[in-house]
Image (tube, helix red, strand yellow):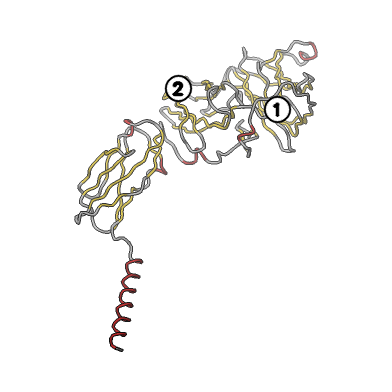
Amino acid sequence: MRLFVAAILLAIVALFCISCEDSSSPDPNSAWITEVENGYVWGDSTTIKLAYSGETPVSVVFFVDNGIQCTDTEAPFAFTWHVNEFTFGQHFLQAKVFYADDAIYETEDFSVRYMPFTFSASLIEDFDGYTRRDESGNLVGDIDMRDWRLRDPNTETTREVVFGDVELNPQGRKVYINWNTAYEYENEGFFLHRGRHTNDWAMGNTIQINAYLITGTEGDGSTVEYSYVDSLNIEYMTYHYWFEAVDRQGESEVFGWYSCTVQEEVEWETKINPVYPNPAEDETVCNFTLEKPGKVSAIIIDKDADILAVIMLPVTFPAGENSFTWNCADFDYGFYRCVYHIENDDIELVGYGDIVHGIRN
């Protein structure tokens, strides 16, 4: 009897050991698609590679969006993906791996976004929401996107503005205007006025250079940055500017004058300039400068780098100040990023400007 019990105990121990060994032993054969440029591809084609552990597979079948693209029967396993045959945006890669014992291993889906030009994860960093403008005119800071909507012009309010610094930067036949406020309370926004003499405001001889009000920003004690590009019949001469802060009853306070001289000789610098108007209701103008003629591409993306609109691919622009218009009337209110790709014989520049569609109440 004792021998029988001992035999049973030994059998249980053996089964337990086998079970533990099975549960702890990894699958000897595994495979995965190697990382692809942080998940972005561009150009005409790219190479997709398979890494594996354990036995060497007999063959590998590669899929893109569940469609067979290639069957490879020799290690190292890879295929040339002709991305220009696909639409821009997100695609999914997968591979079926076949072994000599007829075992089949399926890799996990690998997400890749096909972009029109060089793209990196840095182009969607800090893209969650914005309330203030930085020194480049872009909007920064956190905000609930659902809070953006059109203003009610019938609401009666009063206005208080603590005006700050002004910078006037003439380039070619344009003047880049940057200013800030230290505090705002119920300020509807700003109209900008230009004259040729320092007493033009008092004499009623200025012209208003912005057709639409530049929307004010409710202050919380932090500096708020604004920008505008004056290209209205600019000549080579000295100009003077006044800033009119307006409430909803039409009452206003004027700051200025501020002066600058527009000169004919300009050394252009390739850069991306502020978008205006921003926030935008129906359309906005995206501005950029080219040191020399170059090709420009532009797309609109969301915070996940999904392409919402392809504005142009690519278009040649001359040296100097240039712009294009994005019609956002059919888009939901919210935050968007315009990504530019600028290229000539000397440089390749990829950058962005942020756009708010809608006006915060």
Q: Residues within 10 Å of mark 1 (few under 14, many from 20)?
A: many
**Which image quarter: residue 310?**
top left
Q: Residue at x 57, y 21 (%)?
A: 282
Q: Residue at x 32, y 32 (%)?
A: 44
Quadrant in which the C terminus appears: top right
What amino acid does circle 1 point to? Answer: Gly
> Which mark is first along the chain, 2 or 1?
1
Residue 293 - label: 2
Q: Which residue is mark 1?
A: 216
Residues 237 and 186: in front is: 186
Q: Residue furthest front?
A: 1
**Which image quarter: residue 354?**
top right
Quadrant in which the N terminus appears: bottom left
Q: Residue 229: x percent and y percent?
A: 62, 22
Residues 360 and 232: in front is: 360
**Residue 218 position (above or below residue 49):** above
Q: Residue at x 44, y 31 (%)?
A: 347
Mark toward the viewer: 1 or 2: 1
**Helix, strand or loop status at disc 2:** loop
Residue 72 visible here: yes
**Helix, strand or loop status at disc 1:** loop
Q: Residue 78: x percent and y percent?
A: 27, 45
Residue 322 visible here: no
Residue 199 - label: none
Distance from disc 1 to disc 2, alpha carbons, whole Å, reads 36 Å
